[in-house]
Amino acid sequence: MTMALYAGVTLLRPGTPLDRLWSLNPVAHQDLLMLRKPAGVMFLLIAAVAATTGLGWFRRRIWGWRLAVFGICTQLLGDFVNLIRGDFLRGGAGLLIAGVLLMYLLSNKIRNNFSPAG
């Protein structure tokens, strides 16, 4: 949530000292600057969904669990695309991590901690 919020803010308001963190991934920054406003708004939307997911998760609501599963599935799909595009290290590591997290989230031990109330 924090990084999506950061990306959204810095894309919508470029040229501030906050832009320095983009030095860690300058290629992504240049690519995203071409779509500055739509990308910035999308990152802010992602941050809001992540914050909402966290709220539901910590309140142990079934909708929070479902959003978390959806988020990890989305990450899994993105990692699969990276793998297909030839980024074997990032895609493979991402698939492994997201796959393990998804199995954990889908286990009965975790799923049974969430109530349908609210």
Image (cartoon, rainbow, N blue to C red):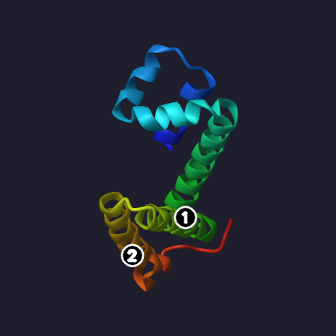
Residue 37 vs residue 47, the one in the foreground: 37
Q: Is residue 111 above or below residue 76?
A: below
**Which residue is nearer to you in this view: 7 or 53?**
7
Nearer the N terminus, badge 2 or badge 1? 1
Q: Residue furthest bottom?
A: 108
Amino acid type, residue under disc 2 in the picture: Tyr
Q: Which mark is residue 104?
A: 2
Horizontal arrangement in the rendering, residue 31 relative to residue 18 (left or right): right
Q: CA distance from mark 2 to mark 1?
A: 16 Å
At 41% from the left and 29% from the top, the residue drawn is: 22
User: Which quarter shows the C terminus?
Assistant: bottom right
Residue 29, position as x, y percentages in the image: 48, 32
Q: Amino acid at mark 1?
A: Thr
Q: Residue 94 falls in which quadrant of the image?
A: bottom left
Instruction: Count the labels in the image.
Output: 2
Confirm whether residue 102 shows in the render.
yes
What residue does disc 1 label?
74
